[in-house]
Image (tube, helix red, strand yellow):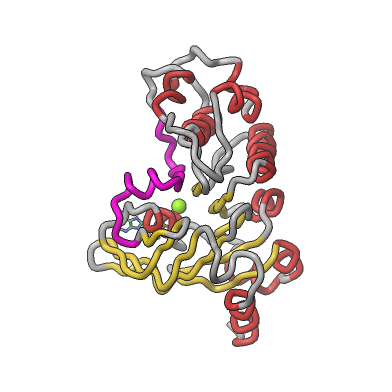
Amino acid sequence: MTAAMTGHRTATVTGTGPGTGAGALLEVSELDAWYGRARILNQVDLAVARGEVVALLGRNGAGKSTTFRAIAGLVEQRSGRVSFAGTDVSRRASYEIARLGLGYVPEDRRIFTDLTVMENLEVGRQAPRNGAPSWTPERLFTLFPNLAEMRNRPGGRMSGGEQQMLTIARTLMGNPLLILLDEPSEGLAPRIVEMMANAILELKKEGLTVVLSEQNLHFAALVSDRAVIIETGAIRYRGTMAELAADEEVRRAYLTM
Ligand SMILES: Nc1ncnc2c1ncn2[C@@H]1O[C@H](COP(=O)(O)OP(=O)(O)O)[C@@H](O)[C@H]1O
Ligand SMILES: [Mg+2]
């Protein structure tokens, strides 16, 4: 990798543009994470401003899920600083971080299969939060129209894509300020992918801050303002979606199979 490639992008990180430095809703610096003795994350820096949609891109095994899990307080062995909504959450437990308004949707859908769609949504309900969009089941059914038609269906009798949407909807019932979406388009049928992209664009319009991970550059480009690329646990690139689209060398180095 050329120095120019990484050096140039680093300049955008330390500048004064959106998602940089003071005033960021989420600010991650020098984040390391280990599973046992294996170091998985290496000095990850990431700043996200209010209202941004940022894509964390990288191939399978690059460290996307670990980054999200570490931010959400779900990796036991981590170091570095994570600041969220003005609070240092580096040492906080995952439930405390969630309570501050950080929503996390893992890549494996976690719905209650015995509960109906409505009951699953009720499980996620939290009080309205200052500065965050407020959600009700009815508003979520506008966001995910297909869920409206199955409100009394048990979660276990939904397709994978419907379960994915329900997981997101349930997280939104907590009225988060920011939502981490781990590979929201993964395994979805094309028609459902389009619904998912529309839903994320609606969330942005509502003012929600979104960080999503993706291997699918096409999907990320539909919904995101900018991209951050991770490989072997380290950030390798930052740029706008337009810059990344124009940079075939970076795409080939870090994204294509
Ligand atoms: N629970 C775990 N224990 C040990 N290693 C893990 C665990 N989860 C992930 N890893 C390893 O951490 C690295 C990053 O994984 P992950 O964050 O899941 O990547 P991605 O989400 O980008 O596919 C991979 O090498 C993976 O094998
Ligand atoms: Mg993953």
Residue 9 rendering spot, x and y as whole percentages: 63, 77
Q: Is residue 70 visible?
A: yes
- Which residue is depicted at the point 70% across and 66% down? 244
Tell which of 30 and 153 is nearer to you.
30
Based on the displayed image, in which of its 4 quarters is residue 54 positioned?
Answer: bottom right
Residue 102 shown in magenta: yes
Is residue 160 among what the camera can see? Answer: no
As rendered, which of 149 and 36 lies closer to the eye? Answer: 149
- Residue farthest bottom in this picture: 3
Q: How many marks?
A: 0
Quadrant (top left/top right/bottom left/bottom right) for the C terminus: bottom right
Percent coordinates x, y for residue 95 in the rendering: 32, 44
| Placement of the N terminus among the 4 image quadrants | bottom right
For the magenta stretch, what is the residue range? 90-111
Which residue in the rendered view is the most extreme toward the left? 36
99 lies left or right of 165: left
Front residue of 69 and 123: 123
